[in-house]
């Protein structure tokens, strides 16, 4: 591992936030860690300069300050966030005052109070108003200190070369510390923004799993009722034949597993044909072809989808018997209203006589077969083969002539039936 990789690994581990950290603290945690560590390092540099210049008070002051920041680091990991925050900021103010009184404004130690102004806003404890009050208080201390020391001699008079050393090194340490304090915060902001983008993509994906994109976009703009007329769509209902008997012989978990396999297969086919899944209720499945954005003739698309569903079901076996799953499928086309109603747990749905007839086609159908009204069979007669069923009793519609979809006609006119 190269030195660069080792450094990056160390930095990543250093900036790690414990899993049990409260959510409102997480964004500040890494920033505080860097702040306390840098403060300790900066005070080490001041301690060395104070020792070299024989400034006893400042030397011993930093001997106390360095362990204090180490304690702040420990308190941070012990979840004493507020105590560590106040200890660190209190030390910076006291250090700025003490160092300025000791050696004057030449080394700009009063600038060490300015990180407190930044820290006042980098915390979740207080409101913006209180944060501004804390920052204003720190600025007032810095201003008063500069005014007080403007025409007063410091306690210690620095001699060459220590005056130059303090004058040059102290501002550099301050600037590097401020830069290092800001960078982790911006890095955390970028990470938070990346997480927000990822969360948005996930929520958008979930929303588009429930609603068509045009409807989802409209729903985000307005929360009112959405109802659109569609002159011609094709509705497909599918239901597992004998599902009650199948489920009675299986544990509940196996029933759910079987339903998931069946409906996942239907979902994959629906995606392939570009139709919109409306819902599943129990063992029933509903899709619609012909909504805005879809391609092809709705009736033809629905017919081909139904044939593919029927074929695919032969590949899925009931666990208790080994027999292939058979579905009753009903298709109808016509005018519908599609949209969202209500305020809670809403779902995209269809209403209209065409929907009711499609549901009746499924309910009165036969296992493993696809039933359509005669009008739809006639509309597709040049492209698909149908087997007339004759008249049947349809609830709410009386006697209706229906047909079974057998297969798709090839260019030679021969049926490609299952």
Image (cartoon, rainbow, N blue to C red):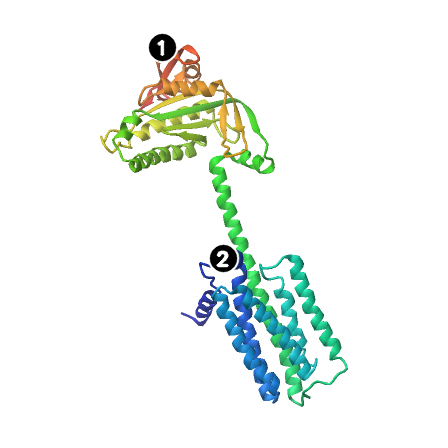
The mark found on residue 22 in the picture is: 2
Numbered disc 2: secondary structure: loop
Of mark 1 and mark 2, the one earlier in the sequence is: 2
Residue drawn at x 37%, y 23% as measured from the top left: 329
Q: Residue at x 37, y 35 (%)?
A: 264
Residue sitting at the far right:
151
Residue located 62% across and 61% down the image: 121
Q: Residues within 10 Å of mark 2 (few under 14, many from 20)?
A: few
Instruction: Describe residue 186's horizontal placement relative to residue 398 as left or right.
Output: right
Q: Name which quarter of the figure residue 228 lies in.
A: top right
Residue 133 higher or lower than 284, as above or below: below
- Name the one closer to the observer, 37 or 149: 149
The part of the image, by quadrant, that contains residue 118 is bottom right
Visible residue check, residue 129: yes
Is residue 44 in sight in this rendering?
A: no
Residue in the foreground of this view, choosing between 296 and 287? 287
Q: Quadrant of the N terminus?
A: bottom left
Question: Which is nearer the eye, 304 or 414?
Answer: 304
Residue 186, image x and y in percent? Answer: 57, 61
Quadrant of the rendered image containing residue 250:
top left
Q: Residue at x 27, y 35 (%)?
A: 251
Q: In the picture provided, is 185 more to the left or to the right than 147?
A: left
- Disc 1: which residue: 390
Residue 359 lies, in percent from the top left, at 41, 21
Real-space Cα separation, disc 1 to disc 2, in angstroms? 69 Å
User: Residue 30 at x, y = what percent?
Assistant: 52, 64
Q: Is residue 165 above or below residue 274?
A: below
Residue 280 x %, y %: 41, 30
Q: Nearer the viewer, mark 1 or mark 2?
A: 2
Circle 1: element type: strand
């Amino acid at each position: 591992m190269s030195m660069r990789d080792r450094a990056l690994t160390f930095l990543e581990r250093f900036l790690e936030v414990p899993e049990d950290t409260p959510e409102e603290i997480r964004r500040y945690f890494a920033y505080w860690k860097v702040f306390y560590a840098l403060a300790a390092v900066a005070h080490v540099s001041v301690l060395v300069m104070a020792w070299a210049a024989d400034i006893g008070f400042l030397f011993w002051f930093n001997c106390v300050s360095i362990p204090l920041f180490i304690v702040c680091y420990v308190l941070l990991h012990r979840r004493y966030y507020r105590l560590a925050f106040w200890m660190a900021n209190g030390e910076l103010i006291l250090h700025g005052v003490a160092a300025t009184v000791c050696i004057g404004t030449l080394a700009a130690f009063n600038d060490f109070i300015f990180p407190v102004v930044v820290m006042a806003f980098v915390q979740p404890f207080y409101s913006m108003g209180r944060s501004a009050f804390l920052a204003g208080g720190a600025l007032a201390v810095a201003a008063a200190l500069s005014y007080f020391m403007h025409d007063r001699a410091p306690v210690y008079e620095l001699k060459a070369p220590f005056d130059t050393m303090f004058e040059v090194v102290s501002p550099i340490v301050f600037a590097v510390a401020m830069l290092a304090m800001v960078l982790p915060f911006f890095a955390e902001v970028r990470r938070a923004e990346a997480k927000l983008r990822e969360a948005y993509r996930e929520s958008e994906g979930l929303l588009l799993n429930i609603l068509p994109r045009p409807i989802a976009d409209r729903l985000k703009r307005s929360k009112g009722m959405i109802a659109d007329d569609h002159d011609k769509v094709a509705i497909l209902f599918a239901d597992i034949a004998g599902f009650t008997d199948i489920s009675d012989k299986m544990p509940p978990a196996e029933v759910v597993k079987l339903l998931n396999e069946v409906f996942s297969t239907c979902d994959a086919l629906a995606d392939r044909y570009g139709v919109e899944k409306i819902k599943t209720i129990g063992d029933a499945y509903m899709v619609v072809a012909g909504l805005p954005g879809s391609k092809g003739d709705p009736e033809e698309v629905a017919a081909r989808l139904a044939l593919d569903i029927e074929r695919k079901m032969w590949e899925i076996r009931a666990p208790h018997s080994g027999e292939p799953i058979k579905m009753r499928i009903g298709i109808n086309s016509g005018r519908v209203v599609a949209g969202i109603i209500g305020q809670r747990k809403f779902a995209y749905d269809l209403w209209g006589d065409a929907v009711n007839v499609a549901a009746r086609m499924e309910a009165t159908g036969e296992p493993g077969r696809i039933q359509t009204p005669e009008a739809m069979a006639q509309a597709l007669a040049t492209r698909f083969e149908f087997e007339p069923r004759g008249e049947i009793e349809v609830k709410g519609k009386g006697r209706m002539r229906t047909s079974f979809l057998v297969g798709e006609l090839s260019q030679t006119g021969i049926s490609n039936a299952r």
